[in-house]
Amino acid sequence: MPIIDYIFAGVALIAAYFAARRTTNPKIKLAFGIGWGLFILGVLLHDNPYLFVSLHIGSIILIVTHLKNIQSCGLNFKKPKESQ
């Protein structure tokens, strides 16, 4: 297995950890853990076609969880005002 798979798994773990550590909703924390687990299972075992599907399911869970986390934090992404 290439070393890049392990590096990718480590980066994904760090991203999920920092996204989940500041949320107060335990369901979001659990969803980050489940999504990360499925994603990494698919990355590390991508040779098995049945476990490769878990990569896509984990990705979808992580994307939805990130969006729900942003929504629950009340973050507004506004355009910066243009200076004149």
Image (cartoon, rainbow, N blue to C red):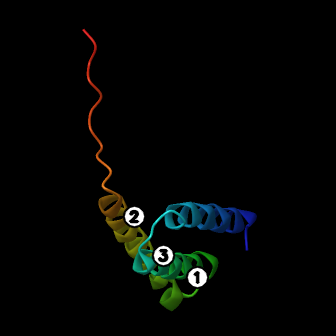
- Which quadrant would residue 31 be assigned to in this image? bottom left
Q: Are marks 1 and 2 in contact (CB under 8 Å)?
A: no
How many marks can you see? 3
Q: Amino acid at mark 3?
A: Lys
x, y (%) of residue 74?
A: 30, 55
Secondary structure category for the residue under label 2 = helix
In the rendered view, does 61 fall on the left or right side of 6? Answer: left
Label 3 CA crowd tier, 10 Å (few <14, some 14–19, many 20+): many
Give how far apart the Cα atoms at labels 1 and 2 are. Answer: 19 Å
x, y (%) of residue 58?
A: 45, 77
Disc number for residue 29: 3
Residue shown at the point (58%, 82%) measured from the top left: 41
Residue under numbered circle 1: 41
Secondary structure category for the residue under label 3 = helix
Residue under numbered circle 2: 66
In the image, 31 versus 59, the foreground residue is: 31
Give the label, 3 or 2, closer to the camera. Answer: 3
Q: Which label's residue is closer to the chain start, 1 or 2?
A: 1
